[in-house]
Image (cartoon, helix red, strand yellow):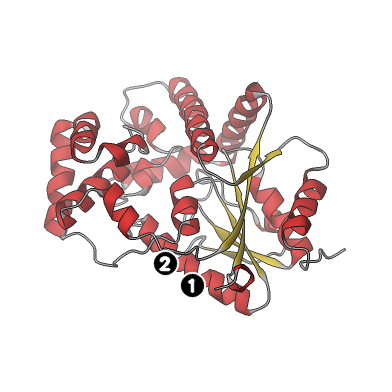
């Protein structure tokens, strides 16, 4: 297949609080695009503040997809995302519009760009329940050590505290008998599926990023984050994925009467900064990333110029 026959996809990634939502919406308006959220938590209904969903004003009238489409009780995985995003890319392209993927979940973006294929077969429920029970008894660190033994390559790309991803990797190992990293190699197509252009937003000064993260946490709290986090805490047994999200679990100690609120707020700010560092590390290891300075006043014009250089026939609207 010729390169120009592959669906074009524009991706806007980078760490939290860098303005991905605003840039994606502005580009969509200028290029006739539609946005697909590449965020593992924004799919959930009712979890709005902690997941930093775009407001109607921030959407600027641009169609957004994969937002508010699942109840928090439903599981959601990278396989679900790749399948649904692939369908949306085909539909948006068929309408003569440009698919724009925006979000900071690096695993989602990389799996989509690499064209990974998933069997659609989910691990047996008894296996899933057994691993969850072991995690409750032994702790997240013990499960991560087990993954390091079973699949050290996959473990490199998973934070030890990300229990949901650790368990999914262990499920894959035990259900299929192959390490997850080996499965990904086998599931990678010989030829690229898409013609991608990946922008990554960042700040030259790391302190500026951290200050923006802290300010956003303060705005979230003023908007009602604590009440939303309490809802997750009250349903922590029923919300298998959301309970792992940064923005909610940091307040569990407060709701349990074990930590003061101020300490939990600082814990959230630190967790968000740590997450931003992990996001930057992922994008730096990804080939073909085009880095953009998030604080540049000419950010939109710079991005449009780079897009025109890559796809000369894609003319911006005035």
Q: Residue at x 76, y 66 (%)?
A: 314
Q: Position of residue 36 (x, y in %)?
A: 56, 61
Of helix, strand and loop, which one carries label 1? helix
Label 1 vs label 2: CA separation?
A: 6 Å
Q: Are marks 1 and 2 in contact (CB under 8 Å)?
A: yes
Count residues near mark 1 (Cα–Cα under 10 Å), then give few for <14, some for 14-19, many for 20+.
few
| Residue identified by numbered label 1 | 87
| Residue identified by numbered label 2 | 83
Looking at the image, residue 187 sits to the left or right of residue 300; the answer is left
Q: Residue at x 23, y 41 (%)?
A: 151
Q: Residue furthest bottom?
A: 94
Q: Quadrant of residue 90?
A: bottom right
Looking at the image, residue 2 sits to the left or right of residue 117; the answer is right
Q: Quadrant of residue 243?
A: top left
Q: Position of residue 137 (x, y in %)?
A: 13, 34
Looking at the image, residue 307 sits to the left or right of residue 174; the answer is right
Residue 199 vs residue 153, the one in the foreground: 153
Q: Is residue 70 visible?
A: no
Q: Quadrant of residue 91?
A: bottom right
Count residues near mark 2 (Cα–Cα under 10 Å), then give few for <14, some for 14-19, many for 20+.
some
Q: Residue at x 48, y 72 (%)?
A: 87
Q: Is residue 298 above or below residue 35?
A: above
Q: Is residue 18 above or below residue 34?
A: above
Residue 26 vs residue 191, the one in the foreground: 191
Quarter in which the N terminus is drawn:
bottom right
Q: Position of residue 197 (x, y in %)?
A: 63, 55
Q: Residue at x 19, y 30 (%)?
A: 142
């Amino acid at each position: 297949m010729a390169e120009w026959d592959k669906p074009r996809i524009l991706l806007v990634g980078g760490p939290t609080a860098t303005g991905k939502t605003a840039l994606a919406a502005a580009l969509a308006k200028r290029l006739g695009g539609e946005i697909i959220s590449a965020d593992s938590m924004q799919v959930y209904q009712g979890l709005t503040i902690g997941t930093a969903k775009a407001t109607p004003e921030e959407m600027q009238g641009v169609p957004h997809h994969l937002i508010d489409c699942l109840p928090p009780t439903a599981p959601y995985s990278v396989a679900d995302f790749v399948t649904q995003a692939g369908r949306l890319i085909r539909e948006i392209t068929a309408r003569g519009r440009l698919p724009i993927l925006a979000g900071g979940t690096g695993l989602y973006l990389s799996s989509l760009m690499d064209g990974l294929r998933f069997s659609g077969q989910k691990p047996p429920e008894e296996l899933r329940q057994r691993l969850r029970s072991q995690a409750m008894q032994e702790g997240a660190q013990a499960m991560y050590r087990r993954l390091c033994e079973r699949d050290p390559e996959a473990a490199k790309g998973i934070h030890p505290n990300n229990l949901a991803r650790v368990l999914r990797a262990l499920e894959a190992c035990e259900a299929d008998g192959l390490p997850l990293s080996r499965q990904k190699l086998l599931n990678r197509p010989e030829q690229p599926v898409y013609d991608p252009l990946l922008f990554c937003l960042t700040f030259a000064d790391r302190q500026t990023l951290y200050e923006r993260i802290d300010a956003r946490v303060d705005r979230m709290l003023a908007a009602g984050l604590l009440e939303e986090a309490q809802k997750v805490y009250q349903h922590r047994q029923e919300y298998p994925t959301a309970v792992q999200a940064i923005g909610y679990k940091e307040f569990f100690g407060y709701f349990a009467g074990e930590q003061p609120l101020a300490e939990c707020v600082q814990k959230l700010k630190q967790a968000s900064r740590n997450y931003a560092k992990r996001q930057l590390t992922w994008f730096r290891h990804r080939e073909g990333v085009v880095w953009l300075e998030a604080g540049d006043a000419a950010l939109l014009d710079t991005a449009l110029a780079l897009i025109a250089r890559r796809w000369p026939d894609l003319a911006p609207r005035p």
